Image (tube, helix red, strand yellow):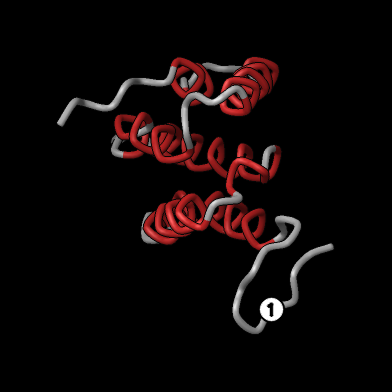
Amino acid sequence: MAAPMPVPEVQAYTAPNSSEEEQQASLDTLVSRMRAGTPSPRDLIAGMAAQLTSEDDRVRTRGCMLFAQVLAAAPELFAADSDVQTAADFLSARLADRVSARAALTGCLALLQRKGARVAGVPAAN
């Protein structure tokens, strides 16, 4: 199995010295690329491995927040059941990391707020 390809926008967004403007530019570029087809949600998560296993709490938290912001900005990228499952699995795993919990919950909320989201016992967002 090939190693996951690094995602340059993830590296730029999670860099400890990146400004809010640089983070927003990275997010915008990443969402545009994903809407064009690459990376897929699954490839994005795989490409974030270094950031999500970093010993630097800020890098791990920013990686999780980037994913949450992608989910909020481009919910259409998570329309397929397999992509929803991938996102849910990713976010639930990030809840175990105390410093990433807030970002993971932000992502969970974005996942639930997708138009047409189907969650047992919870009405879909309009």
Q: Residue furthest bottom?
A: 121
Looking at the figure, which quarter contains the N terminus?
top left
Report x, y in % for residue 94.
41, 54
Report x, y in % for residue 58.
45, 35
Report x, y in % for residue 106.
62, 53
Categorize mark 1 by other alpha carbons within 10 Å: few (<14), some (14-19), many (20+).
few
Between residue 3 and residue 26, name the one nearer to us: 3
Looking at the figure, which quarter contains the C terminus?
bottom right
Amino acid type indicated by mark 1: Val
Q: Residue furthest right?
A: 126
Residue 57 occupies which quadrant of the picture? Answer: top left
Q: Is residue 88 above or below residue 23?
A: below
Q: Residue at x 34, y 35 (%)?
A: 46
Q: Is residue 3 left or right of residue 29?
A: left
Q: Residue at x 65, y 84 (%)?
A: 121
Q: Is residue 63 above or below residue 75?
A: above
Q: Residue at x 53, y 23 (%)?
A: 13
Q: Is residue 99 left or right of residue 66?
A: left
Between residue 57 and residue 104, name the one nearer to us: 104
Residue 109 occupies which quadrant of the picture? Answer: bottom right
Q: Residue furthest left?
A: 1
Number of labels in the image equals: 1
Report x, y in % for residue 12.
50, 16
Q: Residue at x 58, y 47 (%)?
A: 78
Q: Is residue 105 above or below residue 24?
A: below
Which secondary structure, mark 1? Answer: loop
Q: Is residue 41 left or right of residue 34?
A: left
Q: Disc 1 designates what residue?
A: 122
